Image (cartoon, grey):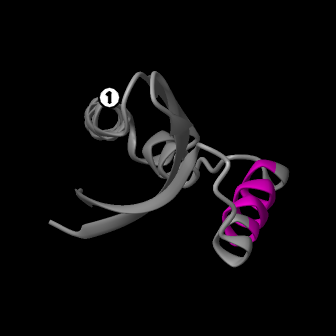
């Protein structure tokens, strides 16, 4: 079993949160930061379970499915901008590296 690490970002404010796993192009929405983190972990687990049922060639393609480059670049730039300016805009942004046993 390999320990796969996936890069995920979350952003939001009370009552409205969204998260995306840029390594598998999976996105979720919820009301709290904890809810989107839990939804993301569940979504990734379900996705990996479905991928494991596929043929090896298809499985390899699905495990390399990334969010489009412009989405990844926008998230990284936004996260860095927020971290560097430390603006208190009433929202919060976070990145997560989720361990996923494969």
User: How far from the left and from the top, in percent, is residue 39?
Assistant: 32, 30
Q: Is the residue marked by circle 1 packed among few (<14), some (14-19), or many (20+) residues within 10 Å?
A: few
Indicate whether residue 29 is drawn in magenta: no
Instruction: Single out the residue that lies furthest toward the bottom.
Output: 84
From what the image shows, is residue 35 above or below residue 8?
above
User: How far from the left and from the top, in percent, is residue 30?
Assistant: 42, 23
Q: Is residue 25 left or right of residue 48?
A: right
Identify the residue position indicated by label 1 in the image: 50
Indicate whether residue 74 is drawn in magenta: yes
Residue in view at x 33 percent, y 41 percent: 37
| Quarter of the image with the C terminus in it | bottom left
Is 94 in front, or is 76? 94
Residue in view at x 32 percent, y 29 percent: 50
SS at circle 1: helix
Q: Toward which corner of the image does residue 6 lie, by quadrant?
A: bottom left
Residue in view at x 77 percent, y 48 percent: 71
User: How far from the left and from the top, in percent, is residue 81?
Assistant: 76, 68
Q: Which portion, as a residue range, is magenta?
A: 71-81
The secondary structure that most of the magenta stretch takes on is helix
From what the image shows, is residue 45 above or below residue 101?
above
């Amino acid at each position: 079993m390999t320990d796969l690490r996936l890069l995920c970002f979350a952003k939001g404010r009370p009552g409205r949160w969204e998260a995306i796993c840029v390594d598998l192009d999976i996105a979720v929405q919820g009301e709290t930061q904890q809810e989107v983190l839990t939804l993301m972990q569940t979504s990734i687990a379900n996705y990996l379970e479905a991928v494991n049922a596929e043929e090896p060639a298809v499985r390899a393609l699905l495990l390399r499915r990334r969010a489009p480059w412009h989405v990844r670049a926008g998230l990284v730039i936004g996260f860095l901008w927020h971290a560097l300016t430390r603006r208190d805009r009433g929202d919060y942004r976070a990145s997560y590296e989720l361990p996923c046993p494969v």
